[in-house]
Amino acid sequence: MSRIFVTRKIPEDGINLLQEAGHEVTISTKEGVLTKEELIAELGKESYDAVLCLLTDTIDGEVFDATDAKIFANYAVGYDNIDLEAAKERGVTVTNTPGVLTETVAEYAFSLMLAVAKRIPEADRFTRAGKYDGWAPELLLGSDLKGKTLGILGAGRIGYAMAEKAYRGLGMNIIYNDIKKNEHFENDLAATYKEDIEELFAEADIVSVHVPLLPATKHLVNGVRLAMMKKTAYLINTSRGPVVDEKALVEALKTGQIAGAGLDVYEDEPALAAGLSDLDNVTLTPHIASASVETRGKMSLIAAQNIVAFLNGETPENVVS
Ligand code: DGY
């Protein structure tokens, strides 16, 4: 029997799997996120063999040093909350939960695109506020998407799934940027590679962000690039907040430099940049792009499977490096 610490309550699928495999599971009883100090204190209370952690946990060398656990299974596809160098130095295995959330996050990005282009959250607020006093020819005019150009930043699995929905479902043209060309984009979606990212910003009617957060992608969407976008264009971000310079985005939305934005992630979560929530042309949601019952359950299972494999002396399926 091994001991596993879970940093916050997650769907029970994975917890059941760990227990059925004969392991003892301790779940943090704190309502919210453990601070790094609290996590270190928790890890010091017992001798743990594995940790199941969340994207809201800061996992660095000090945390690794607080436990004998040699696997940290992140309950997320992203793992920018974990210091991989520090893990490597200490021989700690880190895993994530890719694949299962691809379609869910892409559906969400697609929904945000429709929500902002059709101004649905704004129209909902308007109607609830009792402002609807009869049909009017120019009330809350939105934008059509058929034939428009979707610019995908990051040609990974989620970027592809978003592009596919827009191409097949809405008849949009796809352009994309990544470090290299992607033949699936080219062959399946008639997409055009924009090696020069700035061309993508200038040509797209919608820019949708699907890159991981790395030093090279921090503020990839900055004030200069926002200024290159069409005044009628929208920005969608379901990846990681710091990819977008949020202060610059507030300015671009305020001054009408771009028409609107749909954001599920923020630069300094859960805080929002000053002025962001005052704007009507932005739809804001609380980092829930992967939050379907099905997907969050599968993420829990995969994180647990990674731990079980590791504790059995096997290489887990989703090791990140
Ligand atoms: C992830 O898995 O990285 C997502 O952001 C969680 O919703």
Image (cartoon, rainbow, N blue to C red):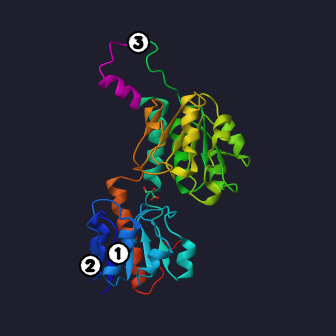
Q: Residues within 10 Å of mark 1 (few under 14, many from 20)?
A: some
Nearest to N terminus: mark 1 or mark 2:
2
Could you tell me which secondary element the residue under label 2 belongs to?
helix
Specify whether residue 237 is in view: yes
Specify whether residue 321 is in view: no
Closest to the observer: 86 or 217?
A: 86
Q: Are marks 1 and 2 in contact (CB under 8 Å)?
A: no
- Quarter of the rendering occupied by the N terminus: bottom left
Mark 3 residue type: Ala
Q: Residues within 10 Å of mark 2 (few under 14, many from 20)?
A: few
**How far from the left and from the top, in percent, is residue 233?**
59, 32
- In reply to whether residue 41 is colored magenta, the answer given is no
Give the number of the mark in front: 1 or 2.
Answer: 1
Mark 2 residue type: Glu
**Residue plotted at (34% across, 85% down):** 47
Q: Which residue is mark 2?
A: 20
- The Cα atoms of the two marked residues, 2 and 3, are separated by 61 Å
Q: Which residue is mark 3?
A: 136
Q: Magenta residues?
A: 121-135
Q: Is residue 1 left or right of residue 55?
A: left
- In reply to whether residue 124 is colored magenta, the answer given is yes
Q: Up-down: is 112 above or below 125?
A: below
Q: Which residue is mark 1?
A: 41
**How far from the left and from the top, in percent, is residue 178?**
66, 53
